[in-house]
Image (cartoon, helix red, strand yellow):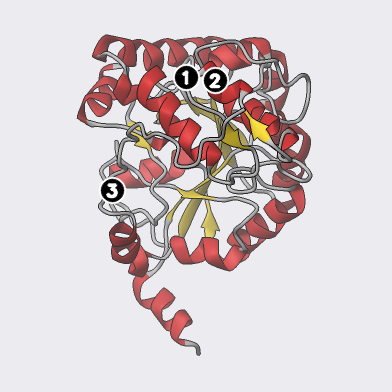
Amino acid sequence: MSVWSLIERAFGWSGVVAYHGVGDSPHSPTMHISPGRLHAQLEYLRDHHTVVPLRELVERWRAGASTRGCVAITFDDAYAGVATHALPILQTLDLPATVFVASDYAARGASYWWDDVERQRLAHRGGAWCVAPSAVGLPAFPAADEIAMDRIRSHVIAHFGGRWPHGLSDGGRTIWRALDFQELYRLASDRRIEFGVHTLSHPALPFLPYSEQVGEIRENFALLRDRLPRVLPVVAYPYGLYNRSTVRAAREAGMTVGLTMEQRASAEHPNPMLVPRVGGSELRDPQSLARRLNRALRPAFIIRSGGPHPRLPIDRIPLAPVQI
């Protein structure tokens, strides 16, 4: 038996895996995933762990029951690829999942600003890229700069609360957009699928006034319950960001669980409002995903992340602007 197998037996594994968009040749492989990669990861989780509905994991936390070996699967932002690609895989493997819906996007079946901006950057890779940066008050970037999106994301969060301040050309009816409510209702016909709260407009909640944080969560919850079945009082904090005010707002809005994006296994009985998730993406193989779900490595991942909680982005001037 390998050392790794012994560690797994000694400490066990548990947690929540978070996916985003699913489609061929994902333009952002650190965030999205291809159908083939998703199938490989989910098949590995099914064969090596006990995949349970998020609802069951929450009930075990409440009851003080063991969650050893239990993993729940989630999809943030309710991308169209969940219905087109992920659902058939979930059906084939007979796995449950929870889909978190940002209702302003679902109302229009709209694309998300970060996908529109990244596709724009890739289209300008051969030279300077100025359209999206200038829209948020930044100088032009070399379009080939692979960390340009990180800089823009931090800037939009710090200055605009995570909302793009100007209209972008909509990405169209592609796989990289939100499902609209009619499509979500059809998705709900499969009882493997449950739904959760992802706010109205997908803002960075800690950068909003307290009352607005409450409204973003509470109104999203009410709208989803009115339009869809099996909606859980569970919020996935947009961008994985929160602070004490956000946790208090989530509780006031009726949430019993809050999910973050802190890339590690959950404890046997975690703080229900601060449950970490491990991100699944095109860049992860099944084994690396499983390592992050191992409880023995929780301290290492906390140290690697610089602490147990996410750091709120601070604005920074791009390191390599270009003149155009």
- Give the secondary structure at mark 2: helix
- Image quarter (top left, top right, bottom left or bottom right) of the C terminus: top right
Estimate the x, y position of residue 62 in percent, counting from the top left: 29, 41
The residue that disc 2 covers is 134
Alpha carbon distance from label 2 to label 3: 42 Å
The answer to whether the residues at label 2 and label 1 have Cβ atoms under 8 Å apart is yes
Between the C-alphas of marks 3 and 1, the distance is 40 Å
Residue 14, how many percent across, how many down?
Answer: 42, 58
Q: Residues within 10 Å of mark 3 (few under 14, many from 20)?
A: few
Identity of the residue drawn at 52% across and 58% down? 50
Q: Position of residue 197 (x, y in %)?
A: 46, 24
Q: Residue at x 70, y 32 (%)?
A: 119
List the residue tagged with mark 1. Answer: 137
Vertical order, 146 against 168 (above or below): below
Disc 3 to disc 1: CB gap under 8 Å: no
Residue drawn at x 34%, y 69% as measured from the top left? 296
- Label 3: which residue? 270
Q: Is residue 309 visible?
A: yes
N-terminal label among 3 and 1: 1
The kind of residue tagged 2 is: Ser
Q: Using the image as rendered, state which of residue 248 and residue 185 is in the foreground.
A: 248
Which is more toward the observer, 283 or 8?
283
Residue at the farthest front position: 323
